[in-house]
Image (tube, grey):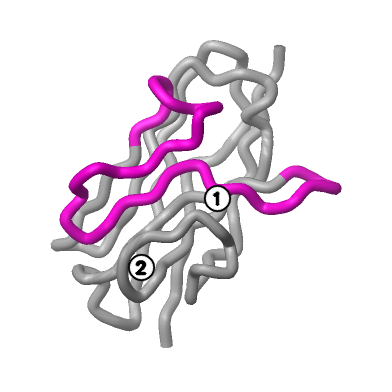
């Protein structure tokens, strides 16, 4: 059974940094795409960043480009999101997702999801 568990969320001030982690288990993820999405109440879940198994040419949403970095460790099945220069508009629940194959940009493209971790950025 596939399980994804996010960690690292919390309450920070604008300009601070956070590092999210997603521990994956239950299958071999080394050939899967992994991604981070985020969602605020009343809005659709939106992609933040995605990376294929090779970590070559990851995708970043325009809103976080230059501030966030996605990375993965295939040896221990962990996905990371380093978030720097956080802004209040980054406040959301952040979700880890896995897709069998190359990454997609829509939530429906993904096969497995974690329960999410809250990130709150105060001004």
Image position, residue 6 (x, y; %): 48, 55
Q: Nearer the viewer, residue 38 or 73?
A: 38
Query: Does 51 appear in magenta?
Result: yes
Query: Which residue reaches farthest bottom?
Result: 1
Q: Residue at coordinates 54% horizontally, 48% vertically from top-left?
A: 47
Mark 1–mark 2 Cα distance, whole angstroms, equals 16 Å
Residue to which mark 1 is pinned: 37
Look at mark 2 in the image and give the residue it sits on. 24
In the rendered image, which quarter is residue 123 located in? top right
**CB within 8 Å, label 1 to label 2:** no
Q: Quadrant of residue 75?
A: bottom left
Q: Give the extent of the magenta segment.
A: 40-69
Which SS class for mark 2?
strand
Up-down relation of residue 41 to residue 113 (above or below): above
Question: Residue 65, how many percent across, how many down?
Answer: 43, 26
Of labels 1 and 2, the one closer to you: 1
Looking at the image, residue 34 sits to the left or right of residue 53; the answer is: right
Expressed as whole percent of the image width and height from the top left, the position of residue 68 reads 41, 29
Comes first in the chain, label 1 or label 2: 2
Q: At 62% from the left edge and 37% from the top edge, which residue is drawn?
A: 119
- The relative height of residue 107 versus residue 117 in the rendered view (above or below) is below
């Amino acid at each position: 059974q596939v399980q994804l568990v996010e960690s690292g969320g919390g309450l920070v001030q604008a300009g601070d940094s956070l590092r999210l982690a997603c521990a994956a288990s239950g299958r071999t993820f080394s050939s899967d795409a992994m991604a981070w999405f985020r969602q605020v109440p009343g809005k659709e879940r939106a992609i933040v960043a995605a990376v294929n198994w090779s970590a070559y040419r990851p995708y970043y949403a325009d809103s976080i480009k230059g501030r966030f970095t996605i990375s993965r460790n295939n040896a221990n099945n962990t996905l990371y999101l380093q978030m720097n220069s956080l802004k209040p508009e980054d406040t959301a629940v952040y979700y880890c997702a896995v897709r069998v194959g190359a990454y997609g940009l829509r939530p429906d493209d993904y096969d497995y999801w974690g329960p999410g971790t809250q990130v709150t950025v105060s001004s």
